[in-house]
Image (cartoon, helix red, strand yellow):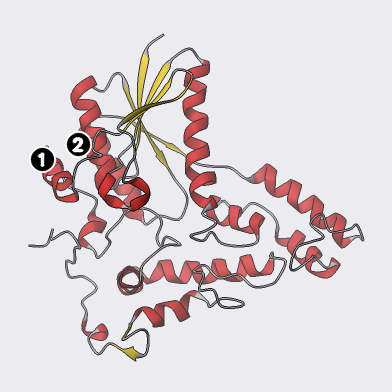
Amino acid sequence: MSIIHVVSYSTGKDSQATLNLAVEIFGTKNVRAIALDTDNEDEAFHKHLDYTRSAIGVEVVVLKADFSEHMEVHRQRLLAIAAGAPDYHPQAKYPWTPERAAQAAELMHPTGNAFLDLCMIKGVFPSHSRQFCTEELKRNVAVEYQLDLVDAGHTVVSWQGVRRDESKRRANVAKFERIGPRMYAYRPIVDWTAEQVFEYIASKGQKPNSLYRRGMSRVGCMPCVNVNKDELKQIALRFPEHIDRIAKWEKIVKSVSRSGMSSFLHTGQAGGTDIWERVEWSKTTRGGRQFSLLTDLEDANACASAYGLCE
């Protein structure tokens, strides 16, 4: 069987450069691009997928997790508790009461949104220490796709747009390694800088995702649970519809959680704070003690880039 080069494509700069490299070396015939749709992205994600298909000439397969069966199993457990059965996690800090279990069971049906369905099952949003979104919405789906290729007799090389200067966690990541039977990981841009990535994309006559010129330093979830203060402020300014959506999600997840408390952005406070409180905090300076007088003067349509793309 053949060797298939699978590129994990997020529509971000690093994966765009990685996809170009794969096609440059092996052509489009032996390269497959996969994009993991979490249902928590801006529309720029889908627009850039279409742009990529045209600009690079490669098909991008969009994959998405489905939690409908898992939700039904969880709903049946909740119905049993509501009917008097014991909690299946009796040592939990907030054990289910029959009343809360009945309320959660009534709402525990697929919404059509993978991210929200996952959080409803968990009864909580992901956090930096419990980043189950990456595992269940991206990694597991991508691995399953690649294992299917291996089961069909192919050898798979998984191309990953990872750079060592991104974080301490990635500082020593291997450029090439075996990750399983007939499965290998290749990270061709581990030694590149962000500047080199943008220069390479430009050399191909291509544009990076438009979000990089709209105040975003990264492309992915909108917002990510690890969003920093300035980026949250930019999202609220430029994409207020996403803040509205998260506020609605918070109400739903609170209603199906054990405690009745769940915040999209964790702060360590008991009960957390809702997304609108965090947006107000993002507008402050001096450790959150003072509101910036410049916030209201910012233009939501003006170019803003952490990488100097507006210059």
Q: Is residue 57 above or below residue 170?
A: above
Q: Residue furthest top?
A: 1
Classify mark 1: helix, strand or loop. Answer: loop
Give the label on residue 55, or none: 2
- Indicate which label's residue lies in the foreground, 1 or 2: 1
Which quadrant does the C terminus fall into? bottom left
Residue 289 at x, y percent in the picture: 37, 90
Disc tally is 2
Quadrant of the rendered image containing residue 97: bottom right
Tell me, yes or no, whether the two marked residues, 1 and 2, touch with CB atoms within 8 Å: yes
Instruction: State the quadrant of the N terminus.
Output: top left
Q: Which quarter of the picture shows residue 205?
A: top left
Which of the two labelled residues, at mark 1 and mark 2, occupies the earlier sequence position? 2
Residue 50's spot in the image, x, y percent?
Answer: 29, 41
* Residue drawn 26% across the image and 44% down it: 14
- Rendering quarter of residue 239: bottom left
Disc 1 crowd rating (10 Å Cα; few below 14, some 14-19, many 20+) is few
Q: Which residue is mark 1?
A: 205
Vertical placement of 288 versus 236: above or below?
Answer: below
